[in-house]
Image (tube, helix red, strand yellow):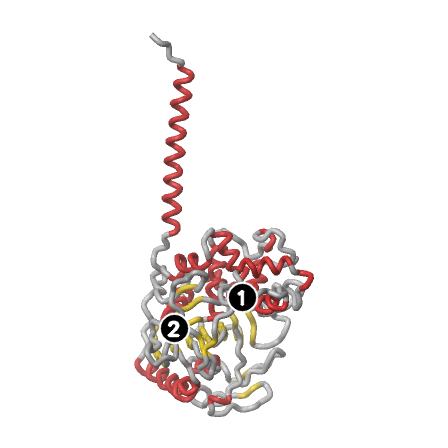
Amino acid sequence: MKRINVGLFVGILILTLLINSCAQNDKEKKAAMAVETEIPPYKIPEPKPISAIEKQSIVAQCQLFYDTTLFPSGLNGGIIVAKGGNIIFERYKGFINLDNLHPITSNTPLHIASVTKTFTAMAILKLQEQGKLNITDSLTQYFPGFNYPGVTIKTLLDHRSGLPNYLYYMDYLGWNKDSIIQNKDVLAWLIANKSQMKDSSKADTKFTYCNTNYALLALIIEKITGKSYPDFMKKNIFDPLGMTNTFVHHKGDTMVRSKSFDWKGREIPDNYLDEVYGDKNIYSTAQDLLKWDRALTHHIFLTAKTLETAYTPYSNEKLGIKNYGLGWRMNIYGDEKKIIFHNGWWHGNNATFIRLLKEDATIIVLSNRFARSVYTSKILVNIFGPYFDVIEEDTENIVTPAIPEVFSTETKTKKGKKGTNDFSDMNIKKEE
């Protein structure tokens, strides 16, 4: 009879148990990861009740603006004006590719250009809430060799990084325009060509709107999550919110995109800058953007505390109503009177996304044929409150929109110039 080596037997038994235990743990970890990636649908509360009288008043004033300004201006897109989540006014005009065959409808995705930045910024703040980053982190923590001192995630968010804009430096540094730029190229050229960079400045000394900031934020999202920016946005924002007509355009994308046109209706072709995302390249609809607005308003995607930081002005070197938070432009008229918004402009696509937090009102206008009137839609905020009774100047530009009497009984700029009743006189500068 063979003698059994008890020590060897026990060792094999323990090793077997350990292997089985590790296998089980791996299964549990994979299952846990699978659960984490399946974001349940966000539940948006029902719209707040609104009286028939208030609704009729809003419709009448919106219709006036639409008839006198948006409709005749060449708009090729749509508008939604909402109060408390109720869509009060909604119109669509034009054809997807100006072919008179496929009308633009509520389900037609259009390029929202720099309104994309609101999604990128809020995704970064979501990762901070989850403990995966801190916006005070230096970029050197994420990009080895990054050679611009003092640049943090926050200075990217609030456009105080001092970095040059890739829309310009890739060109003057000699990028081959037959080769499409990717986000990684924006970063690589920034690092490799620092000595040749123009228009850069010391970090956190002044506000300079710069698309490079948000191209880098998209890379940070990818580095932290291990997912592509388009995939992360789809799984964490678009799908859970039911934004079924919203997507990020990217290399190899099979989604059918609408073209863009200049104000004369001439098609504007894509170029070597068209696949960088984070700063632009989200396509969406007015209805889907209203869902995004509701998720933020009801603190479904981010907490109230986090959103307070997003709506805080961080560039206070210059006096005036204009400022920038974390992914949001804002006009500030007092402690409780603030317009939170973002505009967009890329090729012939232009967009505006305006939110009045106090009044719970939303104004969204999208067009894929350039129409300056899209930006003058800000005038509609006066339906909900006397925002433009006094227009304060700043040193960047003077904003002197003419305010029809239907919106304000008397309008004056800081210099005392009264407004007129002609919408076409509005002088609102485009702000991406």
Question: Going 54% across and 88% down the picture, which residue do you hit?
Answer: 412
Across and down, in percent, residue 423 comes to 46, 88
Q: Which residue is mark 2?
A: 286
The quadrant the N terminus occupies is: top left
Count of numbered circles on the image: 2
Image height check: is 215 above or below 29?
below
Q: Inspect this view and state whether residue 336 appears.
A: yes
Q: Nearer the viewer, mark 1 or mark 2?
A: 1
Query: Whole-percent x and y of residue 144?
Result: 60, 51
Say which of 424 and 314 sits in front. Answer: 424
Q: Residues within 10 Å of mark 1 (few under 14, many from 20)?
A: few
User: Marks 1/2: CA distance?
Assistant: 34 Å
Q: Residue furthest top?
A: 1
Position of residue 213 in the picture relative to residue 386 (left or right) = right
- The kind of residue on which mark 2 rests is Ala
Circle 1 — which element? loop
Residue depicted at x 65% and y 56% = 147
Q: Which residue is mark 1?
A: 178
- Residue 383 vs residue 24, the one in the foreground: 24
Task: For the residues labelled 1 and 2, say whether their Cβ atoms are less than 8 Å apart.
Answer: no
Percent position (x, y) of residue 134?
54, 54
Chain-order first, disc 1 or disc 2: 1
